[in-house]
Amino acid sequence: MNEHTEPNMADETTVGETAAVAATPEHTPSEHAPSAHPQRSEALAFAIGVAGWLVPGLGHALQKMWGRALGCFLTVGALVFLGVGMRGNVFSSEGGDAFGVLGYVADLGTGSFYFAARALETQGSDVAHAEGDYGTRFLAAAGVLNLLAALHAYEAARGRKA
Amino acid sequence: MIAAIALSLTHFQAMTLFALLISVAFGFLGRRRTNDRVKYIIWSLFLFLLIGVGIGWAMYPFSR
């Protein structure tokens, strides 16, 4: 997924890195540069992280990192789709024990896809068979993966190399 | 709707699918250039499968 045409350029450049380049002596920073408003930049980065959590890939898409956005959306979506198809357990807030709570937190990591999974799994889970057990792992992995992607988008928005 | 599809996969198929999807996600997040991503995905997938099969093989004597 080459977003740039020059062969030696990186495939994706973060918003923060672009701001860092603009702040070099060759590029005189203006009054409206992101570094001039650190609180605003931090709030924007936080909003990007939350967006990335709510909709997998949106945090990267907002920073025009299209390859990563598409990759996150498709992989998280595929994991949720397969997990539900294998009748994995979609945990609810009424889990009860510690494992139920952990599973709920992991499943919530998929953001809006959690509600899609609950809506799609009309027949309930079937963890008595290996497929259902695998499905539960797929769903939890999708959530944790999306949290990692959202954190990545947040760090990229803050200007950390990503 | 989707539950009617009723996916039925073997252990190896499920593990391979899981490894592939996670490797692709790690590759896209961890590397920026396309060539680096492809190399990372292939290497990560290989290690996932190697370690998964290795652990399964090591557990085999205790499975019965």
Image (spheres, rainbow, N blue to C red):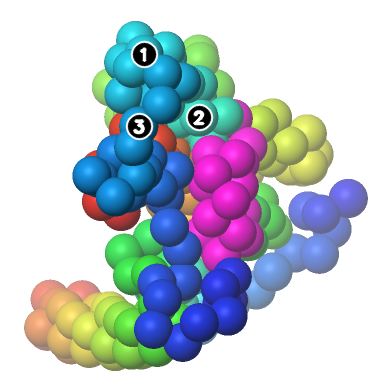
Which label is found at residue A48? Answer: 2
Residue identifier under label 3? A29
Does B62 sit left or right of A117 as displayed? Answer: left
Say what secondary structure mark 1 lies in: loop
Mark 1 nearby-residue class (10 Å; few <14, some 14–19, many ≥20): few
**Magenta portion: prevailing SS class:** helix
Mark toward the start of the polypeptide (1 vs 2): 1
Which label is found at residue A11? Answer: none
Query: Looking at the image, is mark 1 or mark 2 nearer the viewer?
Result: 1
3D distance between C-alphas at marks 3 and 1: 12 Å
Where does the image place residue A20, in percent across and percent down from the top left?
Answer: 30, 43
Residue at 40% in and 72% down: A10
Residue identifier under label 1? A37
Which stretch appears magenta? A54-73
Q: Are marks 3 and 1 in contact (CB under 8 Å)?
A: no
Instruction: Work out whether residue A59 or residue A102 is closer to the camera in this orientation and state it.
Output: A59
User: Which residue lies most toward the right here?
Assistant: B1
